[in-house]
Image (spheres, grey):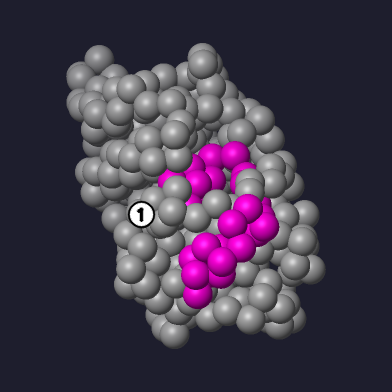
Amino acid sequence: MLRLLAATGLVLSSLAAVQSPAHAQTPAKDWPQRNVTMILPLGPGSGVDITTRLLAEKLSAKWGKPVVVENRPGGDAIVAINAFVSANDDHTFLMAPTSTFTAHPLLHQKLPYEATDLVPVARATNTLIAIGVPASLGINTLADFVKLAKEKPGQLNYAGTTGAVDFVVSGWLKDAGINVAKIPYKDGVQALNDLAEGRIQIYGAAYAIMRPQVAAGKVKVLALMNAQRAPALADVPTAKEAGFDTLTLDGLVGLFGSKKMSPEIRDRIAADLIEAASDPEVVKKLTPMGQVVRPGPAAEFAAEINEQRKRIAESAKLAGGK
């Protein structure tokens, strides 16, 4: 956990790193000079993929250069991060949910990148992270689940998937004083299928993943892990509203750039991305897919990443982690 806490301050310090004149290259007004690449740690069809492609179309039209989206899933997001860091230029970016990497210091003894390699450029959206149970379980609230788990200690299962969400859910289970067995999954879709069939009893994942089974009536969403309610799911409370603050985790998604990028170019890209994400057409398309369009500047994004790192460290401590 100490490694994760030590990394917390590096997100804001990575912003400071691009302030040095030594990093100034192309004047902001002349950027971009060639194709722009956005690397994703998730596969085609994911909420982040669709978000990025919508924004890429808008940004390409504004910049007059193609914006290419590259999907590099696998390796706990390290494949995509390595590709981004290796490019080391101001025309290659990483578009990612921060939860794909904020838990890395707790999961890996050694990482091939430094936290300062990921310079926040702009926040794009918040992915809705849902807590789902099988509809057949017949419960309606998180308090109902806690009550049931206390009545059946060790008899209920939850899907554990590597990363930030798993740490936060594990910490909440311990904090709530319930004994629920963790079933490890590498494939979130398989975990969802098992949830729908009642083979596991609780699962935390992006709402976009759960949505088909929710629509089919097989999965019920008890709460959102996000800090605020979502307009698209107005009847679903947040975990904090339900009385379980330790189950809070925002699904931050945003753009990261190279340390070689000048602050002027970074600020211009941030302004352009915020403008593109605020387009009513983009908002209309993303909202039903479990994305809350919430663009914001680099400093806000960096501060929220730091808060997420702290939250994960606290959850890991609750869960008995590192």
Q: Position of residue 128 (x, y in %)?
A: 48, 64
Indicate the position of residue 270 as horizontal and vertical percent values: 32, 48
In the image, 209 versus 136, the foreground residue is 136
Q: Nearer the viewer, residue 144 or 23?
A: 144
34 lies left or right of 90 = right
In what quadrant of the picture does the N terminus appear? top left
Q: Quadrant of residue 195?
A: bottom right
Callout 1: 10 Å neighbours few (<14), some, many (20+)? many
Magenta segment: 144-173
Dividing the picture into quadrants, the one containing residue 40 is top right
Q: Is residue 128 above or below residue 13?
A: below
Which element carries disc 1, helix, strand or loop? helix
State the image coordinates of residue 144 (x, y, percent, origin top left).
50, 75
* Type of amino acid under label 1: Thr
Residue 245 vs residue 180, the one in the foreground? 180
Q: Is residue 149 magenta?
A: yes
Q: Pointer 1: what residue?
A: 246
